[in-house]
Image (tube, rainbow, N blue to C red):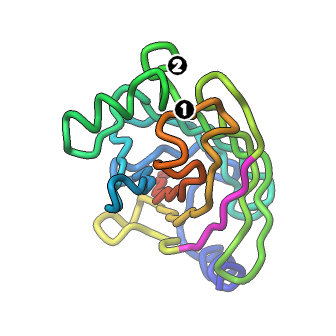
Amino acid sequence: MLKSLLLLLALLPAPALAAAWKLDPATRVTTDVTWEGRIVEVRFPTLSGSIDFDQAHPERARASISVAAGDATTGVAVVDSLLRSRDYLGAAQYPTITFQLDKLTQTSKSTAEVSGRMTLRGVTRPVTFHAQVFAYGPAKDDPDRFEAGFDLSGAVDRTAFGSTGGVPDVASVLPVRIRLLMTSR
């Protein structure tokens, strides 16, 4: 599907190759934490980043996406305070969590493996996410704007980054989801 889309899109107005893209405000980063027998979704609403993506050579993609650890939220104030504390995210000392994309490897027409490095609590470790294309082409609301969207999913062992609060009652391996929507003109 991705290669077919790329061929079709070559006929449409598209961004310059190797263009710097911008994160769309619809981009979301979340994880689930099991707490007291319930699954609690943690959202990171404040994010920023840069993306260099060449639609003719997706394997050359590079990106850096950061979220504000101090803005992590579940919607429950007491849980939010605990989450941001020294034993979990350590938001006061380590205000950002960053993912650096190093390699994108296409695995099917609409999927890829995304490898890179995550920095959490001042510790950097390699991580890999599975990516699924959900949007690729001119935006419906503005045909002069090109958009690409990917759902990334994977897991991160938070204890490898020094986040040991609540273990073993709070899982050490957490699922991570990134709904990445980027645009270019």
Q: Where residue 117 sits in the image (x, y, percent)?
A: 73, 40
Residue at position x 28%, y 46% from top? 74
- The span picked out in magenta is 127-133
Whether tag 1 and tag 2 are in contact, CB under 8 A, the answer is: yes
Magenta-drawn stretch, dominant element (helix, strand or loop): strand
Query: Disc 2 designates what residue?
Result: 94
Identity, as a three-letter code, of the amino acid under mark 2? Tyr
Relative to 102, is 158 on the left or the right? left
Q: Amino acid at mark 1?
A: Ile
- Residue farthest to the front, as pictured: 168
Question: Which of 79 and 50 lies nearest the eye of the viewer?
Answer: 79
Task: Label 2: state its secondary structure.
Answer: loop
**How many angstroms separate mark 1 from mark 2 (CA)?**
8 Å
Measured from the top left, where is residue 141 in percent x and y? Answer: 28, 67
The one nearer the camera, 39 or 73, is: 39
Residue 97 tag number = 1
